[in-house]
Amino acid sequence: MATFNKLHYFNCVVETGSISKASKIFDVQPSSISRQLASLESELGIRLLERTTRNIGLTEAGKTYYDYSKRIISELEEAKRAVGDLQLSPIGNLKISTTVGFGESRILPLLPKFRQAYPDIRIEVELTERIVDLIEENVDIAIRSGRLPDSSLIARKLVDNHFILCSSPEYMNESGLPESPEQLINHDCVVYGYHGWKDWYLVKGNYQKLAIKHYMTVDSVNGQKQLILHGGGIALIPYWAVKDELDSGRLIQVLPEHQFSPCLHLSSTYAIYQNRNLVSSKMRVFLDFLRENM
């Protein structure tokens, strides 16, 4: 910022024709401005100003430098105004990265409503199960599930991941309804294979690993859902992923009196973003929108 201060002083001296007038505008001592101008000329290795006892004029180099300096300061002020507008008014590009299942089940259906409320925000959605680097990939908000490690990032919880066992009525009619968790060993189980969550646990005070027979793993929640919708067996799946199918009767809950988990802890889904002090208005309204609609 020291260089920009020198440019401000230089431009003001040129436009007022006086160091003393410039000192009054900036409320600093004339000697301070004189030192800054001398430092600027020293850095450039050329004289910019012709000083006399009555006025200050520009050298030929000074005229050229003033043209550039005036344009630089003007663009800097314009950039500050543009950034200020972005902070005050929800506008601009918003890049969101979300897991496939949660994105398709919970995020994408909400976006038309968000679009109506904030038509000046352009949204880019990436559906992926991989871990993303918010800074390197210029992602504003990442939506991920699990238990988050300690991080410099900020996490806002959206929903708890309430896992249930589900299957189609057709599969249950053919294979029979298990009457206890121990009977799952007799059924085809469709396992979510990402992040190593291939085990099923009965949550009953502690976590009891269940013996299951799985003939297929799939790396997306929607992949699990499609398999069991077509008679592929039983899946341990988040409630939010199958709510509509449960309501319509296309899927049924298995062993609803028990609590299950695919890992040794209960998990939630979070909106993850960088420093809370630098949250833009477009991010803030989207985060508030998610909280209100979930």
Image: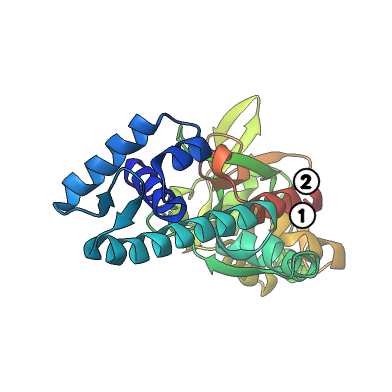
Q: Quadrant of the N terminus?
A: top left
Q: Residue at x 60, y 65 (%)?
A: 92
Counting from the top left corner in percent of width and height, residue 144 is at 55, 50
285 displayed left or right of 14: right
Q: Residue at x 34, y 30 (%)?
A: 31
The one of 173 and 116 positioned closer to us in this rendering: 116
Q: CA distance from mark 1 to mark 2?
A: 6 Å
In the displayed structure, 128 sits above or below 274; it is below
Counting from the top left corner in percent of width and height, residue 246 is at 81, 61
Please rate how many residues cluster around mark 1, counting C-alpha atoms within 10 Å: few if below 14, some from 14 to 19, many from 20. Answer: some
Q: Which residue is mark 2?
A: 256
Secondary structure state at the residue bearing disc 1: strand
Q: Residue at x 25, y 52 (%)?
A: 50
Counting from the top left corner in percent of width and height, residue 7 is at 36, 50
Please rate how many residues cluster around mark 2, counting C-alpha atoms within 10 Å: few if below 14, some from 14 to 19, many from 20. Answer: few
In the displayed structure, 55 sits above or below 172; it is above
Counting from the top left corner in percent of width and height, residue 22 is at 45, 42
Q: Which residue is mark 1?
A: 253
The one of 204 and 114 positioned closer to us in this rendering: 114
